Image (cartoon, rainbow, N blue to C red):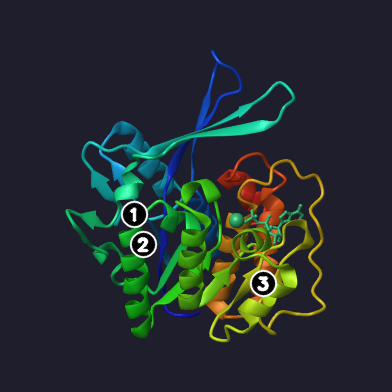
Amino acid sequence: MTSPLRIACVGEALIELIAPSLPGEARLNVAGDTLNAAIYLRRALPEPHRVHFVTALGTDRMSDQMIDFMQAEGVETGEIERREGLRPGLYSISNDPSGERSFGYWRENSAARRMFQTGATCDFSALDGFDVIYMSAISLAILPAPVRASLLEWIAQRRQDGVRFAFDSNYRPTLWEDLETARHTVARAWALCDIALPSVDDEIALFGGGEADVLARFHAHTDCRGALKRGQNGPVAINDDGDPAANFPAAEGVVDTTAAGDSFSGGFLGAYLQHGFVADAMAQGHDFATAVVKHPGAIVPRALWDQMFERP
Ligand SMILES: Nc1ncnc2c1ncn2[C@@H]1O[C@H](COP(=O)(O)OP(=O)(O)O)[C@@H](O)[C@H]1O
Ligand SMILES: [Mg+2]
């Protein structure tokens, strides 16, 4: 086995409020793209490897409970900043009378938006000592523009010391000031990337063109390995190291595609970081995602997951 790795997954953990009717009974979960990926990555890796979630939360009771949730999944929380007077972000899922889901967000002033910020300066020391840093465009979008730029610059320097940078596109237009800023920032992230996990829809929305253009762009980036996520069409390797004959069957009995991409990323990284084989990593990512889309919500409960993947 490779020597134990320390992996930092960076982003925002949100309170998820599922409210079928108002007034009525609601259900609460903890959600967030890079947190979902961290949980599936933790499930994919043997114990000696360490998976941290790096964010900022408040000092309130709900923030405590979110940390308890992460720890119960084996995700480490020792680098999470606790900010007095700030709170976690929240989002709601409700259904209109036809069953269509709609989302509402209360995250503009969340603690996570202040991560790495001490007074007027940035402090990225929470990320010191990690072998791999994983984040998404959402992790960058929620930060003020100067902090984003400094973070990417800090990562560029750490890469010279051998730190690997993994990135998932996850483009959410409403989180960005404008398309041009998103495009510029994500392009910079891809330029720094060692392990790229883009989704074809995100890339087309950001950069235009079609799937062939997306693949040509990543193909030209020869230092980088990874997979292009293509929903039910299955993933494709971004270099020549996928298995061209690989078949990724569409899932049957799809219930909820929430966290398909996040679980793919967790499964992919879990395999790739251990062995370095893209074809096997894509297979594990796809296995994880096809399991996740058959269940409601982002996180398949642990006991059920262990049964599905036949773990003792
Ligand atoms: N309906 C589906 N059937 C089979 N696999 C799926 C399905 N939807 C998603 N996947 C798997 O999940 C991966 C990520 O899904 P995708 O929808 O592309 O990501 P995102 O959620 O980031 O948009 C796909 O590459 C594929 O492996
Ligand atoms: Mg995605």
**Amino acid type of the residue that numbered disc 2 sits on in the rendered structure:** Arg
Q: Position of residue 282 (x, y in %)?
A: 67, 70
Residue, x 44% and y 41% (percent of image)? 14
In this view, which residue lies farthest toward the top? 23
Q: Position of residue 245 (x, y in %)?
A: 82, 78
Q: Earlier in the sequence, mark 3 or mark 2?
A: 2
Q: Earlier in the sequence, mark 3 or mark 1?
A: 1
Q: Position of residue 291 (x, y in %)?
A: 70, 52
State left or right for residue 200 relative to residue 168. Answer: right
Name the foreground residue: 150 vs 270: 150
**Callout 1: SS:** loop
**Amino acid type of the residue that numbered disc 3 sits on in the rendered structure:** Val
Residue, x 47% and y 48% (percent of image)? 175
Pointers 1 and 2 in contact (C-beta within 8 Å): yes
**Amino acid type of the residue that numbered disc 1 sits on in the rendered structure:** Pro
Residue, x 82% and y 49% (percent of image)? 252
Which of the 4 image quadrants contains residue 90? top left
Q: What separation in Å lies between label 3 and label 2 (alpha carbons)?
A: 24 Å
**Callout 3: SS:** helix
Quadrant of the rendering where the C terminus is positioned: bottom right
Q: Which residue is mark 1?
A: 144
Q: Which residue is mark 2?
A: 148
Q: Is residue 212 visible?
A: yes
- Callout count: 3
Q: What separation in Å lies between label 3 and label 1 (alpha carbons)?
A: 28 Å
Q: What separation in Å lies between label 1 and label 2 (alpha carbons)?
A: 6 Å
Q: Is mark 3 within 8 Å of ligand 1?
A: no
Q: Is residue 46 visible?
A: no
Q: Which residue is mark 3?
A: 214
Q: Position of residue 284 (x, y in %)?
A: 66, 66
Does residue 89 sit above or below 73 in this rendering? Answer: above
Question: For mark 2, does the 10 Å Cα neighbourhood hold few (<14), some (14 to 19), or many (20 or more) residues?
Answer: some
